[in-house]
Amino acid sequence: MKKIITLLTLISLFGCVKEDRFPYSDKNAILSFTLPGQASATSIDGDSLMVNISFSEGADVTALTPSGVSISNLASISPDTTLPQDFSDPVTYRVTAENGTSSDWIINVGVQGSEPQLANSDFNLWYSVGNYEQPGESASSTFWDTANKPLAIVNSPNTNKVERSADDFYVNMITIAAPALVRIAAATIYTGVFTDGPPSVTDPRSNITFGTPYAGTPVSFSTEYQYTPGESYEDADGNVIPGNDSCDVYVLLQLVDENDPTNVQRVATAWFRSGETVVDWTTITSDFIYGELPAGSPGYMQPIAPEIWAPAGSIANQITVVYSSSALGDYFTGAIGSELNADNFVLNY
């Protein structure tokens, strides 16, 4: 009987709580905004309520329907983002929070030259996330990412900025002993996003969504680098194996189905892999190969399912750039202490 009375009392108390006791959300931000065919990643400035998107020279932006828009939880947006807009002039979208407050966001679309570069490819911009830093001006505007997030939970991040000269930074990547379950954690910086789910100890690539919007036809890429392989080159079980660790830098131009992001086709490939010790800053340039790789090309640069080769003449709408301090770090093979420094990534036309 006491339990019944207690239950009725609780129901009565909660029934008397007014709805306005719990405040409605006041969040009214645009978190992501993409348009089909854009030449590079979207830049979102939450302070000025500006969204900036670039297109390649000659692009028609007069009737585009947004291909991907996300806003604050429980908020709404107008006009309808499933309808086409003329983006040749700035377009205003109003985002209204759950509590009724609204913000007007300006979408600025610029048609740039035919030789687009990736923003922050000099790696000078970094923002703080708790006890570590990430490449970019802010989490909402960057398309560069690292594996620092899971490492920072139980260890120190292994991809960091280092000052090269006044207000000029480069990326320092060091393969470290893994905090648990696996032997090593290679350092990396890439275009894409580290997913929010728990890190996989069997397939690290599954934790990353690679790529960022891009439209261009470069002939090669260049970057500056330094590299020192670690002393003991070992497999995933800790067995010493012949050879030495290698750094990895590769770029993939891809065609992604906007309605099915798992449908990825390879348009062009460029890569650089070396285990040579390079003390001084050195510039390397690697040519893009459009279409299927010729016989004799390394197996590690072939598409990995579900990615397939794109039909001849396809134009990319995404670029994936990856730097790693241990080329086989995905397989937990490498040397603890392998160190890769990288700066000034450039697409050559």
Image: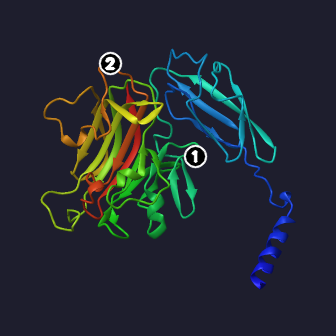
The dot on residue 313 is: 2
- 5 is higher (above) or lower (below) than 57: below
Mark 2 falls on what kind of element? Answer: loop
Q: Position of residue 327 (x, y in %)?
A: 27, 51
Which residue is at 61% across, 25% downward? 109
- Circle 1 crowding by C-alpha within 10 Å: few under 14, some 14–19, many from 20: some
Contact (Cβ within 8 Å) of mark 1 with mark 2 = no
The image shows residue 60, relative to residue 295, as above or below, that is above
Residue type, label 1: Glu
Disc on res. 317 = none
What residue is drawn where x is 80% and y is 57%? 23
| Residue 85 visible in this rendered orientation of the protein | yes
Identify the residue at horizontal 58%, vertical 18% (top origin). Answer: 61
Question: Farthest residue in the bottom direction?
Answer: 2
Question: In this figure, which residue is indicated by the disc labeled 1?
Answer: 137
Query: Measured from the top left, where is residue 275 in percent x and y?
Result: 21, 51
Q: Residue at x 24, y 38 (%)?
A: 302
Residue 192 position, x and y percent, is 45, 44
Say which label, 1 or 2, has the lower sequence index: 1
Visible residue check, residue 48: no
> Splitting the image into 4 quarters, where does residue 128 fall?
bottom right
Closer to us: 287 or 53: 53
Coloring applied to the structure? rainbow
Where is residue 251 drawn, in percent x and y? Answer: 34, 37
Say left or right for 348 vs 25.
left
Looking at the picture, tell me which residue is in the foreground, 203 or 156.
203
Query: For residue 306, what is the image quadrant?
Result: top left
Label 1 element class: loop
Q: CA distance from mark 1 to mark 2?
A: 35 Å
Inspect the image, locate mark 2, and give the three-letter code of the amino acid beneath it: Gly
Which quadrant would the C terminus be assigned to in this image?
A: top left
275 vs 284: above or below: below
